[in-house]
Amino acid sequence: MDLTLKVWRQDGPGKPGEFKEYEAKGISPDSSFLEMLDVVNERLVEAGEVPIEFDHDCREGICGTCGVMINGHPHGDQKGTATCQLHMRRFSDGDRIVIEPWRATGMPVMRDLIVDRSPLDRIVEAGGYISVNTGGAPDANLIPVPKPAAESSMDAAACIGCAACIAACPNSAGQLFTSAKLAHLNLLPQGQPERYERTIAMVEKMEEFFGSCTNHGECEEACPKSISIDNIALMNRDYIVAKFKDRRKAGQT
Amino acid sequence: MTTTGRRQDTKPARKLPWILEFYRSDVAKKWIMAVSGVILLGYIAAHMLGNMKVFFGPEEINEYGESLRDLGGHLVPRTHLLWIMRIGLTAAFAVHIHAAYSLTRTNLQARGRIRYDVPREYLAANYASRTMRWSGVIVILFVLFHLADLTWGTANPDFVRGEVYDNMVASFERLPVAIIYIAANLALGLHILHGVWSLFQSVGANNELYNKWRRYLAWGFTAVIVLGNLSFPIAVQVGIIS
Ligand code: HEM
Ligand code: SF4
Ligand code: FES
């Protein structure tokens, strides 16, 4: 298939950027979106031009590095799919595809389609862990976990940290990502001792970088892992409880 | 670590009193918006229901106005309870508006100046949720006009203090006023259509059991409020009340 690409090109952080058009001829409909970009880049290199830089790693929808805005849709318009898992058969011959980097003050463009997603790491560093003593692995099922809670925790843990939720949000809010990272620990017994400290630390770190939630729900639509905004409600409640709770008198929850 | 992307937040050097410290957080501001929103929702519901008395004639609605001033009967000095309610309402408006202003600034800043080239095709966000700021501004401007019109009387040449029924008729007989009133109530409708659903999310009341009902509740509540409120100017305009 023959396509026209309109791609954001930018030399470095803080540099002015602009859109450039590229012809992408003879693309296989079976190639993935990133493979299509690979082909375009090989041709650019052969022509002595600078290839389009984009982030990618696993190419199987688990690392979260590859997100770009495709025709105004984060990761393209296929629901629950990361850019690397999007295939060119989703498009039609002759299509014009606009490819843009995520846009948010909190994650500035580093180069072309690559943005600085390190604020997401800062948020996880603030509390997205459980402090335990290392040692022998405990027996499985030593700590009972209610099945429905285990399920929602697992669903939240599916977040790959791609930042599509932030890119999709009219407020550039980091709520969906942060709440997913919180929920997957806060719903499990092992997460209880640090639950409220964690929630305060991660929410407040998030607020250093990103906007606030108006409950539009765009993030859930954009998320390649279909993380639910129910997690945001849980985060809001945990944050408010954490702020009011007398933790000297708190048990494990 | 890059600091370029940070929102330009200035942390206060000293620790603030806890309530202000709490209010610094956006999540807390949304909680406060939700709580003040509930107070305002309760108020608009009571206000609409009370005004229904206008359909039962001048005595009924004038008595209603009088009962408001006389709330608490012999237990409290006259109008004191009404004043406590007025102060509470003003406070709810004040924090709601301050939080709206502050979050709007935060969000515009977090979003930055460079927008996407392709206009976003919103999948979940709806007209109501994206116009909260504007519907909110219309509501507060209307509230001020409404007070000037029917409480203080400064915007109503035929205003007579205490004559609730006559004042209402005198006001809504003017077509432009009826139109302003209708438009403002439609804006209020948009605001609460998203607000009633959204506030559950902000306070963390999210439960599979009733999540579906939050939308129905928002629609139902909005429909009752808007239709109720619209009935007054329309009734005056078509002459049911005169
Ligand atoms: C009778 C008057 C009002 C009622 C009943 C009302 C109710 C609500 C409710 C229930 C919410 C949802 C809160 C949440 O999501 O947690 C809300 C949000 C909001 N209100 Fe109001 N409100 C009123 C007046 C105003 C006014 C006067 C303004 C501003 C001038 C305003 C601006 C906003 C904004 C901007 C939001 C969205 C905030 C966000 O999610 O980022 N509202 N309102
Ligand atoms: S919540 Fe979804 S969209 Fe957001 S970072 Fe995680 S996987 Fe990406
Ligand atoms: S490259 Fe790893 S998720 Fe797409």
Image: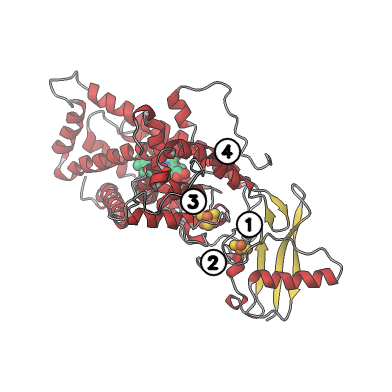
User: Which residue is pictured at 61% across the width and 39% down the height?
Assistant: B7
Say which residue label 1 marks: B116
Q: Residue A74 placed where, x, y %?
A: 57, 61
Badge 2 marks a residue whose secondary structure is loop
Whether residue B138 is visible here, answered yes or no, is no
Any mark on residue A176, and which? 3
Say which residue label 2 marks: A81
Q: Are marks 3 and 2 on the same chain?
A: yes
Q: Earlier in the sequence, mark 3 or mark 2?
A: 2
Protein chain holding label 3: A
What's under tag 2, amino acid-wise? Thr
Q: Earlier in the sequence, mark 4 or mark 3?
A: 3
The colour scheme used here is: secondary structure
Whether residue B196 is visible here, answered yes or no, is yes
Q: Residues within 10 Å of mark 2 (few under 14, many from 20)?
A: some
Instruction: State the quadrant of the N terminus of chain B.
Output: top right
Q: Earlier in the sequence, mark 2 or mark 4?
A: 2
Q: Are marks 2 and 1 on the same chain?
A: no
